[in-house]
Amino acid sequence: MAANQEPEPSWQELLGSKNWDSLLDPLYLLLRKLILRCGDFCQATYDAFNNDQNSKFCGTSRYGKSSFFDKVMLESASDYRVESFLYATARVSLPEAFLLHSKSRESWDRESNWIGYIATTSDETTKALGRREIYVVWRGTARDYDFVFGCPQVGNKAFDERMKRYPNLTVLHIKNTIDLIPHYPSQLLGYVYTGTELVIDTRKSPSLKHSKNPSDWHNLQAMLHIVAGWNGEKGEFELKVKKSLALVNKSCAFLKDECLVPESWWVEKNKGLVRNEDGEWVTALPTDEDLPTPEI
């Protein structure tokens, strides 16, 4: 390290032990990469979630734990492994935005939905890093008003003060300045903002449309695209981390037409249908490793 070079922040500092002081503006490269990795973990929950109500496995992960990261095509998939799946259960009626259920009489479960997973670094990666990283990842809702990075207000002043009592509990909120979701339910109802904010602006990217669609402003992949090239409110957008532009249109049509990327392109082949021996097109059954099984 050069004599005039600042020491690299510790892992604890990247996780917010000092509330990310001096790491957000300019956005420190290692923190930028960590944010992108966490975003990719969140995206995996949407890519794997079976939201097809015609399938008896609606509400589950399409992919089993052993091959999960390979099948969602996570970068450096072999560096991580899924230890456990997470499920949510409700015995009362909830909107389909929160829990989806199969129309099939043979539905795998009438009360539960898969909502995420716990992942760790592999043994090899852990040895190389000198630490075991643990990620607890869950998806938002199953409709356009997903709460992933741009989360809504989640508590009142008392909730915020209680959180601040725990020094190891830190929150970094990545918020698109034009996104509406983070302003709900509203301070008029007693809700407050929690944690440290990294405010970005999707209008900075020359590749994104000037969209009037609020769901685009809240799109996870669009925000990750901006994080990859964010150079502050007054700086020009310039990618600092290689990230495929096509990922933005995974579940939307936010990219400009000249990018030549189809909209909402992440779909199951033939929407999960296969032709059987009788020539009939039927819903494909999961392989043994992808078959949903209750967590013990």
Image (tube, rainbow, N blue to C red):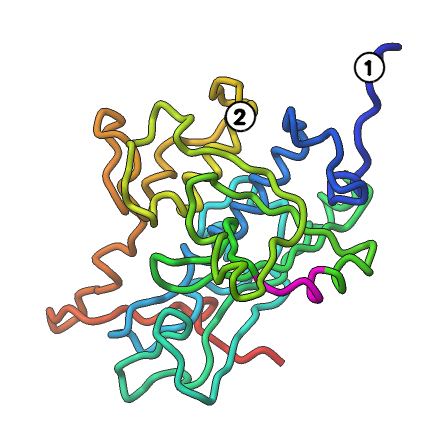
Q: Position of residue 124 (x, y in %)?
A: 72, 45
Amino acid identity at mark 2: Glu
Upstream in sequence: badge 1 or badge 2: 1
Tag in front: 1 or 2: 2
Q: Position of residue 261 (x, y in %)?
A: 26, 34
Q: Position of residue 38 (x, y in %)?
A: 58, 46
Judge from the rendering whether residue 21 lies leftward or rightward of residue 176; answer left or right: right
Start-end of magenta stretch: 154-160
Badge 2 is on which residue?
A: 233
Residue sitting at the far right: 3
Quarter of the picture holding the N terminus: top right
**Residue 261 among those drawn in magenta:** no
Q: CA distance from mark 1 to mark 2?
A: 25 Å
Mark number displayed over residue 291: none
Amino acid identity at mark 1: Gln
Judge from the rendering whether residue 143 lies leftward or rightward of residue 253; answer left or right: right
Report the number of numbered marks.
Answer: 2
User: 94 or 126, which is in the foreground?
Assistant: 94
Q: Dot 2 lies on which element? A: loop
Q: Quadrant of residue 287?
A: bottom left
Q: Quadrant of residue 97?
A: bottom left
Q: Residue at x 36, y 76 (%)?
A: 95
Mark number displayed over residue 5: 1
User: 42 or 27, which is in the foreground?
Assistant: 27
Question: Vertically, is 257 above or below 287?
Answer: above
Q: CB of mark 1 within 8 Å of CB of mark 2?
A: no
Q: Dot 1 lies on which element? A: loop
Q: Position of residue 136 (x, y in %)?
A: 63, 59
Q: Residue at x 68, y 62 (%)?
A: 157
Quarter of the picture holding the C terminus: bottom right
